[in-house]
Image (tube, helix red, strand yellow):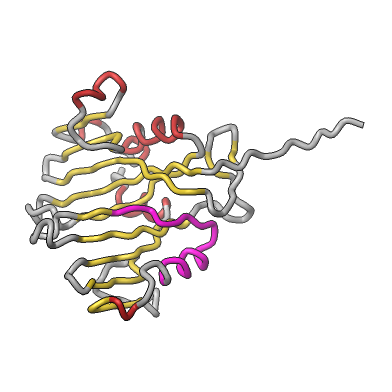
Amino acid sequence: MANNTTQEEVPDLLYHTLLTVIDFHDDTSGYTRSTYPLGTNTTLPAAKAFAAQALEKLNYTPDDFETYAVHTPENNDTWPHGDGVIVYAKAPAGHELVVKLDTTSNDERLSADSDNNTPRLPSPSDHLHYVLQTKVDYHQDRSGASQTTQIEGVYVYRRDALRAAKGMLGDKSEYAQYDERSDLNGQWPFGDDAVVHAVGQTGENYSVAVRTVPGSHKKHAKKM
């Protein structure tokens, strides 16, 4: 008897689209910025295609911006906005929106949905939880504008993402200051989504946050 069972493909890597919003309107140094996940794909071509249209999925059009540039093979040699950046947009008020790609291993062993090249999530989950770490290097730029944010992990369940976020920075005693959020519903001074904030012995600042795509749309989608 023939075996009709189809084995689902489990990719080794996941490709994530991130949106960074830099507020040059209220802070000309570039320190005030935030990074949010917009989606995840199981192939690089699908991720590039998704990222190229990511701002449109947030209800923006190119006419909303003074500058709107998309990275393509045709402009690759002259692209001025950095590796991994797919879309760069500058709003009239001074905000800059940067859409870029990040890559992580598929640690949760999520299978690929071949119809749309996205991870297949177990029911009843309908979105992923992203652990993002931001480092602010005051040695590089005293204004705090030298920042890097990357995805450290992607999880189906929020509890797993929170556990990973709280252990992300390692030994607490190695930091000059270490703050961990215990009440996720209460107020604290390091950002709504941040779970951990730390200051290194030489002044670097670290923040670890847990964010979701629905949360990103709620915060950054253009109001219609």
Q: Residue at x 28, y 59 (%)?
A: 134
Q: Nearer the viewer, residue 115 or 168?
A: 168
- Vertical comparison of 41 with 138: above or below: above
Q: Residue at x 43, y 35 (%)?
A: 47
Residue 99 picture location, percent across and down: 29, 40
Quarter occupied by residue 112: top right
Q: Nearer the viewer, residue 180 or 172?
A: 172
Residue 207 picture location, percent across and down: 29, 65
Residue 25 picture location, percent across and down: 10, 51
Name the image quarter holding the C terminus.
top left
| Residue 21 falls left or right of residue 124 | left
| Residue 9 falls left or right of residue 215 | right
Confirm whether the magenta stretch covers residue 153: yes
Q: Which residues are magenta?
A: 149-166
Q: Residue furthest top?
A: 74
User: How many numbered circles does the render carry?
Assistant: 0
Name the image quarter holding the N terminus.
top right
Residue 14 picture location, percent across and down: 48, 44
Q: Nearer the viewer, residue 66 or 27?
A: 27
Q: Residue at x 23, y 43 (%)?
A: 97
- Vertical comparison of 69 with 177: above or below: above
| Residue 183 falls left or right of residue 71 | right
Confirm whether the magenta stretch covers residue 92: no
- Vertical comparison of 41 with 108: above or below: above
| Residue 50 falls left or right of residue 124 | left
Quarter occupied by residue 12: top right
Q: Residue at x 49, y 48 (%)?
A: 105
